[in-house]
Image (cartoon, rainbow, N blue to C red):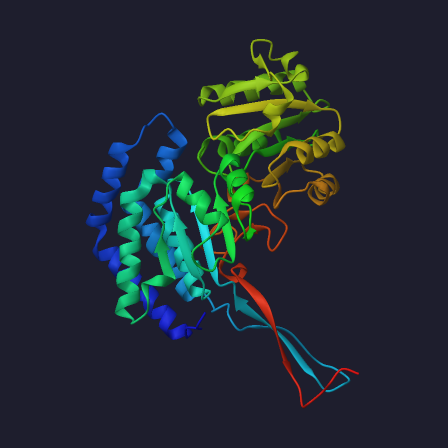
Amino acid sequence: MKLITTDIKNKVLDSMVRILDKNRTELLEANKRDLELFNKNDQALYERLIVDDKKIEEMIAAVQKVRSQEDPVGRDISGEELPNGLKVTNKTAPFGTIMIIYESRPDVTIEAAVLAFKANNKILLKGGKEALHSNTVLVDFWHRALKENNLSTDYIQLLNLNREETRAFLKNPNQKLDLIVPRGGERLIAFVKEHASCAVLVSGRGNNFLYVDEQADWEMSLQVILNAKTAKISACNALDKILIHTNIEDFSRKMMDLAHVLKENGVSLLVDEGAQKVLKDEALIPETSVWKEEFLALKCCIGTVEKTEDAIETINEHSGGHSATIMTQNKETALRFMEQVDCAAVYQNASTRFTDGGQMGVGAELAISTDKLHHRGPLGLKQLVTNKYYVFGEGQIRE
């Protein structure tokens, strides 16, 4: 793919900021049509679909943030002159064409496109049917910005495909495809991995855990749990599972305190056998598979462990590999937990809600990767490039 200069890329982003700001009413009206057609039974999906003035401001800020960041393409990673005289430089390079498949969230249409474009990639946006009107308007905005700067609209494309058409495209794409990012639940991820004919970078599944150690600050723990569980149930960084050390001081009172606080905020509870000894009125977790579920709802599991190693083992067996928190005042215990828990982000005494590109200093994000190749965690601008070796010689041949 032809490389675009940083100056031209930034001019496109300047155009997009102006177009977004000037045409708010057009976008809000399109989003209103999407909301009117949506079945509100899925509260998490409905929350993700909403566009208001605040959301538009966030979209504009995301474009401006990426505009201000250094161009990630063509940066030297390493360089060496070999004994045979060859000069070898490893540089960053665009992926090529990235496809992202996502549900509901129109803001992804902005963040994914701005990141891919600034990293000199083409992006194919396969949004959900529930956001069709919003996404159509947003991609039209992108096309206006590209045309203003004499660039092809092929850089940013919206794919309106049903399930069968998507399956056929994944198996046999009608254009070059280098990377697919499914941003959604387990069924979407499984569907893409089953049918894709190119690399897939898994993203979006949460099922995050928080472990309260015996040396935790209890009031702090309640505050963090409440934020992680209730602040935004539709987010992949929301909390689903809580593990409590049985040796924590005043265990029974604190268990009842935790249950009361969660239920007072509308959270339904499932508990393991250890927790049910205290929380006698709460339903028992019906089967082990529930520990692996991402709820995206005001629902939470409370379990008990007798040592930190048990918490680590439980998290590594059941979590989605996204985020996990330990609440403890013991730095050694915290470090052991953080080193051994196999998640993209591990925390001491903080909410899992911070696993987000903007919150972690990355800026806008394409997704939160739970894969280990090629990157783990928020996929920001610097992560949307691959590498290429430049080898300069003077007629060297290999003997």
Query: Can residue 42 be seen in the rendering of this structure?
Result: yes
Image-quadrant location for residue 162: top left
Relative image position of residue 371 (x, y in whole percent): 60, 47
Image-quadrant location for residue 87: bottom right
| Residue sitting at x 44%, y 49% | 169
Relative image position of residue 108 (x, y in whole percent): 40, 48
Work out whether residue 148 or residue 111 is closer to the camera in this orientation and state it: 148
Question: Of all residues shown, which one is farthest toward the top?
Answer: 281
Work out whether residue 267 or residue 368 is closer to the camera in this orientation and state it: 368
* Left or right position of 19 against 163: left
Work out whether residue 151 or residue 166 is closer to the camera in this orientation and state it: 166
| Residue sitting at x 58%, y 16% | 256
* Left or right position of 168 against 242: left
Q: Examine the rendered structure and indicate whether residue 31 appears above or below residue 209.
A: below
| Residue sitting at x 27%, y 57% | 141
Query: Can residue 349 be seen in the rendering of this structure?
Result: no
Relative image position of residue 119 (x, y in whole percent): 46, 65
| Residue sitting at x 55%, y 72% | 75
Relative image position of residue 167 (x, y in whole percent): 46, 43
Quadrant location, the C terminus: bottom right
Question: Of all residues shown, which one is farthest toward the bottom?
Answer: 394
